[in-house]
């Protein structure tokens, strides 16, 4: 192979490759031993190829350490974000909520503020000159003397090549990198094909010369291949993930942890509002609808309306061009929720959806403040709830502003996981051990003895509130793209959704029915508060209450970062220094916290806030948007049944959002 090194990029001469392989095949026909040597040279020779993530990738898929430092790579990512339409930071920042356990390095990458920009960059972002894929067009390069001076000699048809003694212009280096990246998949595919042809030719000749004329090194080679295969299989089996990717069961755990959040606490109250049958109907309906829309999101990310299992490769590494053959995907893969909206409905649709997503994050912070204050008021009834809200808001500002350390965030991310497991187990075992406690609770509340019964099967007026609470419990579709892109095997995404929703639905039914059995219509809008006030296991329930306070505290901190980054991204192009960006970041977080505190004081109801977010945000993001985008992207390839089902989901979501908001809220 002949290659020329320039600016840390190795250019592969495809014509010389063809000539070398032909010569190899012609020479190897004389003896099997020569064939083995030639084929080994063809298969073992590799070239380093930049893969765009700070490492260099060989043709066989292995990654080697790049000489470029991690910090420099991170800076390039941040600068690239500012070249993309708003919200470019959503994809990486929302990943902070995708995994229940994150390491310090990931937390630091997820929470980095955008790079300061310039007025020119701000003007370009406002003009929103986009390509069909949604990326901003580069600025027009006027006044250049000739193509050869700016291209650096890497463009086809340009013979002049810069000497290594001269430094290329930054835009020329960027142009070269983009050119190489766009052609690497083709180069890699061709070379893999040549290697396979050489190996097949060698095997054919060895088979023809089987017996006495067998190559002397054939047995040794077979042993080496077998040993290498065992080593690779063993490494793959024991490796937790490939290239930082999550395994199947890690993704199941992550998605289940997202769906079973703080909204799990309000399910017994949903049964109290609509009756235990009404609560179960609402839960099962939303479970089915959001399960289906979750699968639709996966297909939109995959770029094809066919099931993910139809493909056996990753959409981000496939050698097939979209639409080139029937086996190829229809469209290019997508990596984030706003990008789905941009591909389906343009920039306006992406902005509208992003506003809803950020409003949902802000509303969640309000819910967490109310939850912390309610649980602390149960522990310290002498302190007013509003005073506690102010205290927890001030305490939440410490990790966000003063102690912005990735290590602290990595610890906070683990709290919610333990709290979710503790709530499910506590409610279930309390129902099994203590049974119906409604009479005891009624007596403690000084209710009349004939006020019962305290359990109802069906309450039609309470259905809107129940639907809102259940909808909030199944929110989290905005984080699904982060889980999808982190999967080691994306073609298993739909099977992962199936298993996750079975687990989540079972746990939700368990908590809702067990909590309603315990306290009936007298249950609080947060089941943990009822357990703290009425359970005989006082010490255990007190510990659970403190755990819920810590959970809401950690979620407040983690949710603030993606919300604040969305606003920082708007101001960063107009700022000239990193200090100005950091100061703006602090100011944005303080303002958002104060606004969330004011909303919490004005609407101090956990159930009302959850139902409001569920009806407006969750229904819009998790019920209406996925089928609407599915129809817009793949309408010509969908069956009549798929189109009808998408229309039913859209109409159902609009009806629930409108009717539920009017009647229930």
Image (tube, rainbow, N blue to C red):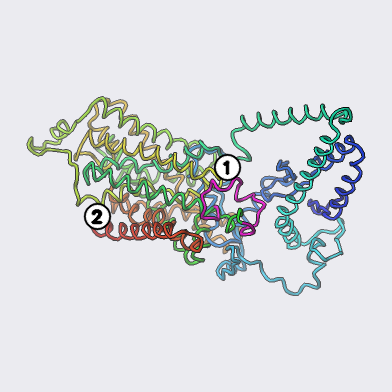
Q: Secondary structure at mark 1?
A: loop
The part of the chain drawn in magenta is 302-325
548 or 389: nearer the viewer: 548
Earlier in the chain: of badge 1 and badge 2, it is 1
Q: Position of residue 346 (x, y in %)?
A: 51, 66
Left or right position of 479 against 236: left
Residue 250 x/y as whole percent: 51, 37
Mark 1 burial class by Cα count in 10 Å: few <14, some 14-19, many 20+: some
Badge 2 marks a residue whose secondary structure is helix
The part of the image, by quadrant, that contains residue 515 is: top left
Asked if residue 412 lies in the magenta stretch, the reply is no
The local crowd at label 2, few if under 14, some if 14 to 19, many if 20 or more residues have their Cα within 10 Å, is some
Q: Quadrant of the C terminus?
A: bottom left
| Residue 542 placement, left or right of 344 | left
Residues at marks 1 and 2, CA–CA distance in whole angstroms? 42 Å
- Mark 1 vs mark 2, foreground winner is 1
Pinpoint residue 345: horizontal percent, then vertical percent: 49, 65
Residue 489: mark? 1
Rendered position, 609 above or below 149:
above
Give me the residue at 39% from left, 33% from top. Answer: 421
Contact between labelled residues 2 and 1, with CB atoms less than 8 Å apart: no
In the drawing, does residue 241 fall left or right of residue 272? right
Q: Position of residue 148 (x, y in %)?
A: 82, 67
Judged left or right of residue 316, residue 55 is right
Q: Residue furthest bottom?
A: 143
Q: Which of the two residues, 126 or 486, is positioned nearer the viewer here?
A: 486
The numbered dot on residue 664 is 2
Residue at the spot 70% in from the left edge and 57% down from the top edge: 182
Q: Is residue 622 above or below residue 380?
A: below
Q: Residue at x 82, y 54 (%)?
A: 14
Q: Evaluate whether residue 278 shows in this view.
A: yes
């Amino acid at each position: 192979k002949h290659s020329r090194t320039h600016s840390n990029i190795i250019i592969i001469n495809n014509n010389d490759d063809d000539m070398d392989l032909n010569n190899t095949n012609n020479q190897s026909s004389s003896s099997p031993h020569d064939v083995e040597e030639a084929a080994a040279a063809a298969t073992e020779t590799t070239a380093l190829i930049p893969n765009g993530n700070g490492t260099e990738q060989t043709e066989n898929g292995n990654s080697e350490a790049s000489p470029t430092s991690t910090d420099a790579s991170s800076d390039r990512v941040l600068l690239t974000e500012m070249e993309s339409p708003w919200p470019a930071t959503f994809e990486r920042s929302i990943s902070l909520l995708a995994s229940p356990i994150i390491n310090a390095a990931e937390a630091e990458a997820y929470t980095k503020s955008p790079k300061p920009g310039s007025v020119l960059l701000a003007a370009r972002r406002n003009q929103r000159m986009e390509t069909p894929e949604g990326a901003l067009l580069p600025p027009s390069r006027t006044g250049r003397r000739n193509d050869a001076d700016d291209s650096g000699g890497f463009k086809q048809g340009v013979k002049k090549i810069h000497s290594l003694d001269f430094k290329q212009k930054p835009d020329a280096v960027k142009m070269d990198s983009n050119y190489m990246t766009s052609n690497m998949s083709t180069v890699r595919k061709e070379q893999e094909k040549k290697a396979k042809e050489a190996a097949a030719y060698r095997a054919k000749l060895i088979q023809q010369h089987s017996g006495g004329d067998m190559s002397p090194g054939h047995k040794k080679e077979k042993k080496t291949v077998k040993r290498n295969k065992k080593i690779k299989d063993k490494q793959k089996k024991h490796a937790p993930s490939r290239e930082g990717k999550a395994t199947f069961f890690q993704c199941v755990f992550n998605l289940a942890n997202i769906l079973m959040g703080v909204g799990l606490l309000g399910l017994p109250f949903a049964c109290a509002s609509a009756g235990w049958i009404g609560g179960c109907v609402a839960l099962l309906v939303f479970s089915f609808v959001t399960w289906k829309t979750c699968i639709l999101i996966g297909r939109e990310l995959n770029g094809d309306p066919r099931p993910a299992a139809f493909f056996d490769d990753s959409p981000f590494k496939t050698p097939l061009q979209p639409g080139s053959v029937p086996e190829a995907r229809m469209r290019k893969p997508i990596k984030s929720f706003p990008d789905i909206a941009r591909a389906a409905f343009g920039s306006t649709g992406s902005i509208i959806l992003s506003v809803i997503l950020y409003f949902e994050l802000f509303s969640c912070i309000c819910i967490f403040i109310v939850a912390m204050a309610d649980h602390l008021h149960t522990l310290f009834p002498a302190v007013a709830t509003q005073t506690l809200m102010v205290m927890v808001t001030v305490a939440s500002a410490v990790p966000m502003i003063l102690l912005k350390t990735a290590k602290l965030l990595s610890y906070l991310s683990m709290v919610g996981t333990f709290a979710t497991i503790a709530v499910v187990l506590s409610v279930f075992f309390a129902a099994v051990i203590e049974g119906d406690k409604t009479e005891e609770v009624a007596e403690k509340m000084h209710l009349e003895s004939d006020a019962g019964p305290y359990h109802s099967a069906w309450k039609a007026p309470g259905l809107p509130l129940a639907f809102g609470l259940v909808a909030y419990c199944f929110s989290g579709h905005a984080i699904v793209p982060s889980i999808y892109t982190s999967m080691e095997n994306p073609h298993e995404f739909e099977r992962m959704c199936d298993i996750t929703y079975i687990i989540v639905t079972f746990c939700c039914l368990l908590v809702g029915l067990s909590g309603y059995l315990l306290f009936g219509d007298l249950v609080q809008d947060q089941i943990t508060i009822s357990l703290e006030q009425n359970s005989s296991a006082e010490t255990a329930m007190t510990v659970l209450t403190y755990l819920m306070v810590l959970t809401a505290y950690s979620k407040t901190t983690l949710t603030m970062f993606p919300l604040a980054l969305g606003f920082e991204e708007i101001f960063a192009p107009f700022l000239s220094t990193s200090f100005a960006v950091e100061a703006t970041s602090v100011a944005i977080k303080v303002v958002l916290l104060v606004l969330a505190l004011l909303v919490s004081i004005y609407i101090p109801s956990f159930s009302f806030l959850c139902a409001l977010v569920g009806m407006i945000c969750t229904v819009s993001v998790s019920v209406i948007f996925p089928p609407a985008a599915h129809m817009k992207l793949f309408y010509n390839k969908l069956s009549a049944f798929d189109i009808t089902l998408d229309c039913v989901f859209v109409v159902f979501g609009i009806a629930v959002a409108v009717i539920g908001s009017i009647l229930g809220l």
